[in-house]
Image (cartoon, helix red, strand yellow):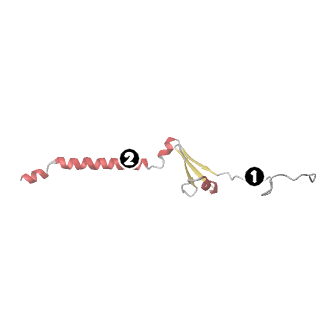
């Protein structure tokens, strides 16, 4: 009878329940920290291509025809500007303009 009474005490069950609750709390904090919208609350933006892929570089952003910028207060659809390279002033290898007078 003494062993049966020891197994029915509520303390071991309460300890296990407390440990399980603490483990669940730790896991929940990790899940919240991994939320991709959490940085938006601190002023950051998330950039996604139109098909939903995360854009992580300027080169990828330039190549995408359309993007979505996610902010804490909403989404802004955008189109990247295509930068044109300036025409070269001199042909490759030439450093100065030729003289008009044949000097």
What is the residue that sits farthest to the right in this orientation?
Answer: 101
| Residue 3 on image: x %, y % | 9, 53
Does residue 70 appear left or right of residue 2 in this picture?
right
Does residue 80 appear left or right of residue 8 in this picture?
right
Residue 5 numbered tag: none
Label 1, label 2: how far apart the Cα atoms are: 51 Å
Vertical placement of 72 versus 101: above or below? above
Mark 2 secondary-structure assignment: helix
| Residue 13 on image: x %, y % | 20, 50
The residue at the point 22 percent across, 47 percent down is 15
Mark 1 secondary-structure assignment: loop
Choose between 35 and 103: the one closer to the eye.
103
The residue at the point 39 percent across, 49 percent down is 30
Check disc 2: other Cα within 10 Å, few if <14, some if 14-19, many if 20+.
few
Residue 29 numbered tag: 2
| Residue 26 on image: x %, y % | 34, 48
The residue at the point 41 percent across, 47 percent down is 32
What is the residue that sits farthest to the front in this orientation?
Answer: 103
Does residue 35 appear left or right of residue 1 in this picture?
right
Q: How many marks?
A: 2
Kindly indicate whether the residue at mark 2 contacts the one at mark 1 (C-beta within 8 angstroms): no
Of marks 1 and 2, the one in the foreground: 1
Does residue 93 appear left or right of residue 73 in this picture?
right
Check disc 1: other Cα within 10 Å, few if <14, some if 14-19, many if 20+.
few
| Residue tagged 1 | 86
The residue at the point 67 percent across, 51 percent down is 81
What is the residue that sits farthest to the left in this orientation?
Answer: 1
Which comes sooner in the sequence, label 1 or label 2?
Answer: 2
| Residue 21 on image: x %, y % | 29, 48
């Amino acid at each position: 009878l003494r062993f049966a009474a020891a197994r029915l005490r509520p303390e071991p069950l309460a300890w296990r329940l407390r440990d399980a609750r603490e483990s669940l709390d730790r896991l929940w904090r990790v899940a919240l920290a991994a939320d991709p919208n959490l940085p938006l609350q601190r002023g950051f933006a998330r950039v996604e291509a139109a098909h939903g892929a995360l854009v992580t570089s300027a080169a990828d952003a330039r190549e995408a025809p359309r993007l979505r910028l996610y902010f804490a207060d909403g989404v802004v659809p955008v189109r990247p500007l295509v930068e044109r390279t300036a025409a070269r002033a001199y042909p490759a290898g030439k450093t100065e303009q030729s003289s008009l007078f044949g000097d």
